[in-house]
Structure formats: C-alpha cells, structure tokens
C-alpha cells in the first residue's frame, strides 16, 4: 500500500575526530625533515667528491698535456714556413743593409765596402715603384735545404736558405737560417781626366798607371828639353762599381787638391785648369822676326851676326841653318807677302820657354825679272837666355801642337788576359796576340762585347788576323779603349 514518498534510510554518521587538546595525550613526531637533511648532506658530499675527482682529473690531464703542448709548440715553430717568416721579418721588414752585408760575407773591393752597399740598396729602395719586399721559395737543388728569393719590384736582391740544425727530439726537424746571399751587378763606372803628374783618388784609393786607358800629347814633346812638357792629358777609367764613387779627388805632386768639373753626359771628371796663356804682341813679333831672319839668311841677305840676334848660336838649329845651302844664287830684290803671313799655335811651356808657328812667303825676284817664292811653315821654340832675351833654340816643320792620342787595348782569351798595350788611334794595322785555340777550333777574330738592357751579350768581331797575325784597322775603330775577346770557331766552319 502506498505509504508516501520513498525515503532511504540515512547511514549512520561517522564520528568526527578532533585534535587532542594540550591536556590530552601528544601525537607521534614527524620524521620527514630529518630524512631530507640527511639526503642533502649525502648529495653535497657526493657532488663534492665528484667535482673533486673531475678537478683532479683535469689537473692531471693538464699536467700531462704540458709536455705535449710544449712539443707541439716546438714542432710548429720548427716548421720551414714559420722559420721563413721569422727570418724574413727579422732581416727584411725593416732591413739593416749593413747587417745583411755582413751576413752575406760580401768581400770589399778595392774601391767599395759596406757603406757603398748600403748607399746602393737605399737608392734602389728609393727608386722602386713598390718598395715593399716580398719573399718566395725557389729551388735549392738537391741539397735538401729550403731557399728563398727576396725581391724588390720583381728583381731578386737577396736570397737566404734554411738548413736542418741539430734537434734534441728526432721527431722534430729543426730548421734554422743557413746562408744569406746578395746577387750584385756592378755596372757603374767613372772616368777621370788628369795631367800625367797628378794622382786620382777614388773613395780615397790612389789609381795606378794600370787604370790609364787614354793618353793625349803633342808632337812638341820631341823638341822639348827633359822635364819640360807641352799639352798632355790622361784618362783613367774605373769600372765594376756598385754606385758612383762617394769621393773623387785629384791632387798634384805636392798633394794639393785640384778643382774638378763633372760632365754628367759622359760621366767624366776633368781638372779645372787655367786657360792656356795667350800670345803677347811682343812674342808674336819675336816669332815673325825669327822666321824672316831664317828666310833672309837662306838667300844670304843677312849675315850670321844678324842671324845670332834671333837664334841661339850654341843650338843645333843655328848650326843647321848656317850649313844649309843658299836657296837662290842671285836676286835683284825680295819682299814678304803680307796676305800669307801669320803666327799661330802659340804655347807657353813655362816662364823660360814657348813656341809659335809662323807661316810666311818671301817672293824673290831674279835678275832676269822672274819670281821665285820661298814658303816658310815652321814652328820655332824660344828659350830665354841668361840675359833675359828669348832666342830660337829649336825648330820643326811639323805642326808641333798636333795631338797624338793613344788608347789601351786589352786582349782576353778564355777569361785570362793575354796582352795589354797602347796604340795610336790612327793606326792602320795591328799585330794581334798569338793565342792557342781549343782542340778542333781556330781563331775567328777579336770581338768587342756588348751587354744589352735585357742582359743579352752580343759579340762583334772588330779585327780578323791574316796568316801573319796582322789585322786591318777600320777608320775610327780605335776611338776609345777596347777590351777584346778571342772568338773561336770550328775548323770545319772555317774551312767552308
């Protein structure tokens, strides 16, 4: 039977527990924080030991790596490239050419030394388009070494090598600097003109006669007393220099400096000598009067007494005039042609002696009215006597002031000098040295060597000997000193 809404019986309620009061019995303590502390201590200890072990391992590792590191450093620093860079930097980053000169063991020459090499290299650097030096390896042959060229504007100015040195560790090749070389091209030269009694000094070094290559004198030398000279000049030549000399001096016999003039177009120094003395009117008249007396005595128009007023009676020339036959037996009159008369080629040798050339014509009329001319073209030498009077002591029909020039010829065969001599520049023929030809070859001739700008050597044969060793000399071929080289050819080629 319906009893109304169904209701489920309620479950009995669980009693609610309440915390005991202080007066009540305490509960058991919580042990979790203590365990956490123990775990933290354990972790700290573990990681401390772990990190210590790691640190110790690193320290041991680092200690063990030090020898390896040092070995690697030594190995790296010993490599050729590293050593090359180090040597190049030390020597050529800011080059000390004096040090390089010493390292290369360049021998001093007679005229040049370290300071000249320094000037040479400084000038090259100053003239370079790109003054930065570069380094490149080149072949060292079979030596096993490393060789490097140091270049300036593409030109090799030095080389250095790396060689194996001693090493404590056989696993490391110890490369160190070996030799330093400096290729030098000595192409500079200088010519100095001087009087024979002067001395030339190049960079303080006196030149001997072996440096004389050209001499100039006059025909007057044959008519002058011993110790008296006319115009003379010598040229001395020095080649094979790196640079132009730092100092060029010429001194006289007393050691006094002679002023010099430099001629850049010919690279020649010449002494600044005083101008030759000019002839005075008195000297001109003395020469003219002597020549007229010479002509007049030839026709016996004057006596020997009159002749002695112009000619030294103790001289050979006076005796020769007196012994000369009469130019013409008889005449009616004579006169000098003023249009032909002249006095030239005056030269004063010292205060006591001078000469002059007289040209004159004396027209002599015979008794039959015909005319015979007597021409005089003579150089007279005047010497002042004890009375202070100038008298003729010598004469010649040669042109006394005509210059005679000689040049030095040097003959080389196989790199050795076989002959050297002076010859007149107007020589028509030469006797050439006799040389022994290599087996299977014959002498073709003597050649002049020329080196072009590209370094190419050209040999031009100037003199070809005949069967007697004599060669014809073309005109102008001896205008300058020559170094001649023997040129040989195969016998078969010579026969063809």
Image (tube, rainbow, N blue to C red):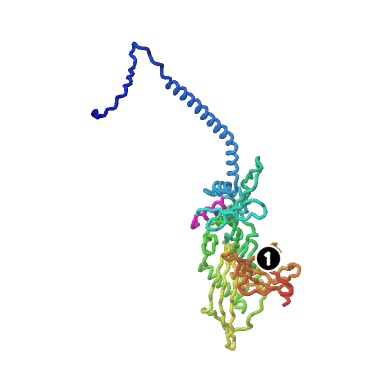
Residue 266: x and y in percent read 54, 64
Find the residue positioned furthest to the bottom. 368
The rendered magenta stretch, by its main secondary structure, is classed as: helix
Can residue 185 be seen from the camera position used here? yes
Residue 456: x and y in percent read 60, 66
Which type of secondary structure does the marked residue at label 1 adopt? strand
Front-lying residue, 445 or 324: 445
Q: Quadrant of the C terminus?
A: bottom right
Residue 363: x and y in percent read 56, 82
Front-lying residue, 99 or 140: 140
Can residue 310 be seen from the camera position used here? no
Front-lying residue, 68 or 146: 68
Residue 127 in magenta stretch: yes
Mark 1 nearby-residue class (10 Å; few <14, some 14–19, many ≥20): many
- At 59% from the left and 80% from the top, the residue drawn is 374
Find the residue positioned furthest to the front. 1
- At 60% from the left and 44% from the top, the residue drawn is 78
**Residue at label 1?**
411
The boundaries of the magenta stretch are: 115-130
Considering only vertical position in the picture, is 291 above or below 58?
below
- At 44% from the left and 20% from the top, the residue drawn is 34
Considering only vertical position in the picture, is 231 above or below 329?
above
Q: Quadrant of the N terminus?
A: top left
> Which quarter of the picture shows residue 221?
bottom right
């Amino acid at each position: 039977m319906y009893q109304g809404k169904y209701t489920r019986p309620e479950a009995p309620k669980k009693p609610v527990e309440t915390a005991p009061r202080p007066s009540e019995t305490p509960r058991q303590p919580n042990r979790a924080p203590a365990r956490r502390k123990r775990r933290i201590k354990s972790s700290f200890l573990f990681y401390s030991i772990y990190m210590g072990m790691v640190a110790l391992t690193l320290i041991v590792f680092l200690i063990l790596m030090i020898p390896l590191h040092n070995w690697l450093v030594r190995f790296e620093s010993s490599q050729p490239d590293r050593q090359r860079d180090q040597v190049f930097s030390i020597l050529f980053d800011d080059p000390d050419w004096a040090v390089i000169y010493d390292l290369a063991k360049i021998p001093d020459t007679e005229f040049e030394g370290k300071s000249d090499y320094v000037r040479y290299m400084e000038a090259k650097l100053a003239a370079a388009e790109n003054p930065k030096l570069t380094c490149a390896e080149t072949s060292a042959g079979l030596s096993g070494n490393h060789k490097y060229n140091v270049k300036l504007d593409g030109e090799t100015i030095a080389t250095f090598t790396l060689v194996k040195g001693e090493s404590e560790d056989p696993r490391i090749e110890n490369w160190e600097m070996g030799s330093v070389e400096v290729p030098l091209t000595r192409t500079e030269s200088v010519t100095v003109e001087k009087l024979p009694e002067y001395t030339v000094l190049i960079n303080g070094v006196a030149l001997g006669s072996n440096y004389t290559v050209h001499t100039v004198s006059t025909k007057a030398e044959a008519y002058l007393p011993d110790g008296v000279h006319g115009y003379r000049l010598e040229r001395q030549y020095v080649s094979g220099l790196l640079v132009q000399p730092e100092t060029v001096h010429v001194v006289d016999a007393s050691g006094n400096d002679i002023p010099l003039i430099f001629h850049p177009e010919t690279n020649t120094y010449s002494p600044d000598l005083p101008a030759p003395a000019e002839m005075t009117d008195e000297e001109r008249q003395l020469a003219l009067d002597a020549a007229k007396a010479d002509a007049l005595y030839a026709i016996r128009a004057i006596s020997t007494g009159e002749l002695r007023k112009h000619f030294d009676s103790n001289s050979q020339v006076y005796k020769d005039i007196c012994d000369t036959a009469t130019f013409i037996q008889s005449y009616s009159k004579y006169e000098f042609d003023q249009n032909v008369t002249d006095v030239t080629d005056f030269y004063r040798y010292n205060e006591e002696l001078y000469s002059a050339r007289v040209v004159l014509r004396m027209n002599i009329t015979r008794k039959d009215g015909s005319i015979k001319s007597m021409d005089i073209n003579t150089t007279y030498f005047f010497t002042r006597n004890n009375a202070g009077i100038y008298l003729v002591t010598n004469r010649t029909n040669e042109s006394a002031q005509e210059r005679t020039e000689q040049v030095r010829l040097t003959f080389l065969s196989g790199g050795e000098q076989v002959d050297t001599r002076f010859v007149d520049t107007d020589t028509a023929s030469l006797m050439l040295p006799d040389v022994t030809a290599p087996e299977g070859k014959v002498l073709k001739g003597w050649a002049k060597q020329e080196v072009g700008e590209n370094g190419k050597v050209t040999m031009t044969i100037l003199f070809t000997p005949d069967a007697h060793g004599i060669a014809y000399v073309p005109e102008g071929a001896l205008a300058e000193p020559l170094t001649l080289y023997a040129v040989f050819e195969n016998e078969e080629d010579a026969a063809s």
